[in-house]
Image (spheres, rainbow, N blue to C red):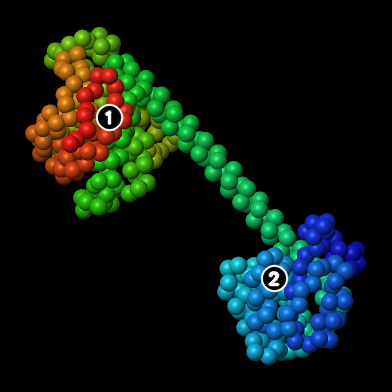
Amino acid sequence: MTHSAHSMHIAQSFGVTQKPTILLVDDSPDNIALLSALLKEQYKIRIATNGIKALQIAAADPLPDLLLLDVVMPEMDGYETCRRLKADARTADIPVIFLTARVRPEDEEMGLGLGAADYITKPISPPIVMARVATQLQLKNAQQQLKNQNDLLEQMVGLRTRELVKMQDATIMAMASLAETRDNETGNHIRRTQAYVAALARKLQTHPRFAALLTDANIELLFKSAPLHDIGKVGVPDRILLKPGRLDADEYEIMKLHTVYGRDAILSVERQIGGSNGFLTFAREIAYSHQEKWDGSGYPEGLSGDDIPTSARLMAVADVYDALITRRVYKPAFSHDKAMHIMREGRGKHFDPDILDAFLEIEEQVCAIASQYRDDDTACQSVA
């Protein structure tokens, strides 16, 4: 393929109806005339006789596809023109080929160091100019195609990731709902408690005790893992789980095993995948330890204080509040005010004092969540 045919092929790759645009920048009319005659068959030509004008044209739509830039010009030389082009994000990707009579290696090194794509010395050789212009346009076109492909791939990956996240979230909710429905609970209990946990975690984000753990990413994981807090109920016999009244001591001991069943179920997942992650860690902590109490009187291990995972302490507050405002076979649904009074009595006993204080500070938000996901057997009115 001849240089001219190769140039035509590159020109055609940019589109049949639109030729690539080359901006010629030279203060010599003879040089402009020579280059224009050489290039006009394959390319659309624009002309600037100084660097200032070149910058104006280069930044205007449509942007040129390539610059042929003289070095020695009045007012602003080619080096400074190139420097400014590359400093502007709008024009930085336009390839620049220097055309100059300067033949010293340091001159070429300087031009290339400024970001120029090539350096051609005068007097020019037409075949060399045509070949190098075509090469730079081909490279620019290939880079643009690669960028377009990468952008498309990124969009596709983003779409598939969002679809996968939705599927995972739906699966988590389905698993959690299965456990809750066995206990005559509803999916709204799950939605309420996970929203309480997220709101409470956000309130505590700047608290010195919790700031390191409660990053935005971890709060998202807490929100996703909270629905699995009672997943272990699937292992509790119906005669206990569905008993229409209070449990006796032996039955209560069996009921308490739902924390162990939940932990073991999540541990089995971790073993199958050969490790854990933030989501599974929070889910395991919450499932196993959300019935622990700050003073050590909870179960299954009787942990106290900071020995109870933070995730479980958050869930303890959320779960107890929601149980209080929800009707049970052994109690009516308490009002928000009565529920909050009972919660205050548990400060430093059932609940981490700092977490409970934060919960009290966001009680309007808590009640709004309860109202948004209200069931027929919940009783929460807006806080005055």
Q: What residue type is disc 1 on?
A: Ser
- Residue drawn at x 27%, y 49% as measured from the top left: 205
Viewer-nearest residue: 293 or 220: 220
Q: Is residue 204 visible?
A: yes
- Identify which residue is drawn at 85% across, 71% down: 40
Left or right? Give the position of 175 relative to 106: left
Q: Which type of secondary structure does the marked residue at label 2 adopt?
A: loop
Q: What residue would you read off at disc 2?
A: 95
Which quadrant, please, contains the C terminus? top left
Residue picked out by circle 1: 371
Q: Quadrant of residue 127?
A: bottom right
178 relative to 78 in the view: left or right: left
Q: Amino acid at mark 2?
A: Pro
In primary-sequence order, the first of circles 1 and 2 is 2
Measure how far apart labels 1 and 2 are at the Cα level. Answer: 61 Å
- Whether 357 is drawn above or below 25: the answer is above
> Which one is closest to the eye, mark 1 or mark 2?
1
The image quarter containing residue 27 is bottom right
Q: Secondary structure at mark 1?
A: helix
| 120 is higher (above) or lower (below) than 225 | below
For label 2, the crowd category at 10 Å Cα-Cα, with few meaning under 14, some 14 to 19 and many 20 or more, is: many
**Residue 54: where, in percent of width, then height?**
68, 78
